[in-house]
């Protein structure tokens, strides 16, 4: 009897190992195909080829994430896809972009929770008439962006939320960098936007907003990120200047000084002019689209 139990136990263990190995083989094969499509949709010279690869990638990626055991697969070879997770790995958020035409970039995103539930994000950024800083949005009304950093935090009431630092290549003239706020309801549904940012003005009521947005010239380079040494969010100060892009006119560019957002009393509070080295000309790298080949999107 004891010998039979040993045989049964060993058989069960071997079966589990076999199924696990088989499952990983499925995900590895899917990832190889996904990596091919991702490379084409990021680097193909013609928009129609990028769009075709986008359709194939999106369909296969959602299908693959919908399979049992997918949350344990890392998808590390998808270098054109941003993947961010909190420290407890309770979820992960994927975001990606496709330049379907000159000055037209589409954004896609999906949140996968640890119980393998998927929340597909629908970008409606350009369809919203104002309210960017004040409104709350759900997964069906997402402000599309590539997220390059995620931070965990809590409101003054102890509610957990996540700061998402992202960039949107708005059009051929301007980019937008934003810090959005992700939180989950008790039912596990994701929402974007919480009034955790404030600006204090002497003698006036504090201004509180649900997110931060910064629109600036497409040929300029702008810093929007958390500086752990300074313990604050550091943002380039923007000033108006005439653009060097033909047809644009006046635009916003960094002037070499910075503003900050420091966590005080549970709110990210604006700090004016944390550095004052003013430049005669704003730093301007080469155009973004000319520099995409060979660059990783994750964390950049």
Image: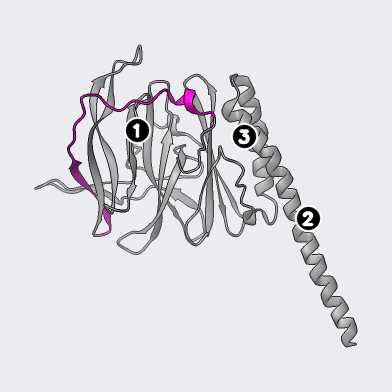
Which quadrant of the rendered structure holds the C terminus? Answer: top left
Query: For the residue carrying disc 1, how many other residues have a C-alpha within 10 Å: few (<14), some (14-19), or many (20+)?
Result: few
* Residue at the spot of label 2: 22
* Labels 3 and 2: the sequence-earlier one: 2
* Residue at the spot of label 3: 38
Report, in whole angstroms, how far the alpha carbon at label 1 lies from the one at label 2. Answer: 49 Å
* Labels 1 and 2: the sequence-earlier one: 2
At mark 3, the secondary structure is helix
Residue furthest to the front: 294
Q: Are marks 1 and 2 in contact (CB under 8 Å)?
A: no
Write down the quadrant of residue 220 in the picture: top left
Q: Which mark is residue 130?
A: 1
Q: Position of residue 85 (x, y in %)?
A: 50, 53
Residue found at x 57% / y 40%: 79
Residue found at x 83% / y 74%: 10
Q: Is residue 288 magenta?
A: yes
At mark 2, the secondary structure is helix
Q: Which contiguous range is marked in magenta?
A: 266-293
Q: Which mark is residue 45?
A: none
């Amino acid at each position: 009897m004891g010998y039979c139990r040993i045989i049964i136990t060993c058989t069960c263990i071997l079966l589990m190992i076999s199924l696990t190995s088989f499952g990983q083989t499925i995900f590895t094969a899917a990832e190889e195909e996904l990596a091919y499509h991702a490379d084409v949709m990021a680097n193909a010279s013609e928009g129609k080829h990028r769009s075709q690869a986008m359709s194939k990638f999106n369909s296969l990626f959602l299908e693959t994430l919908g399979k049992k055991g997918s949350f344990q697969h890392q998808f590390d070879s998808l270098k054109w896809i941003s993947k961010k997770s909190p420290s407890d790995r309770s979820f992960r958020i994927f975001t990606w972009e496709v330049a379907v035409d000159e000055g037209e970039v589409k954004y896609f995103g999906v949140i996968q929770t640890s119980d393998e539930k998927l929340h597909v994000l629908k970008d409606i950024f350009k369809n919203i008439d104002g309210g960017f800083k004040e409104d709350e949005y759900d997964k069906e009304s997402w402000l599309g962006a590539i997220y390059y950093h995620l931070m965990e935090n809590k409101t003054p009431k102890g509610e957990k939320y996540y700061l998402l630092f992202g960039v949107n290549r708005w059009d051929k003239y301007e980019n937008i960098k934003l810090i959005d706020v992700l939180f989950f309801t008790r039912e596990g549904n994701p929402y974007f936007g919480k009034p955790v940012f404030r600006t204090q003005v002497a003698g006036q009521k504090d201004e509180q907003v649900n997110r931060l947005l910064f629109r600036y010239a497409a040929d300029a380079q702008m810093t929007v990120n958390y500086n752990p040494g300074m313990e604050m969010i550091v943002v380039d100060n923007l000033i108006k200047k005439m653009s060097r892009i033909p047809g644009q006119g006046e635009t916003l560019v960094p002037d070499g000084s910075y503003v900050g957002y420091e966590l005080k009393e549970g709110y990210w509070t604006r700090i004016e002019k944390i550095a004052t080295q003013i430049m005669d000309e704003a730093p301007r790298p080469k155009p973004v689209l000319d520099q995409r080949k060979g660059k990783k999107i994750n964390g950049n």
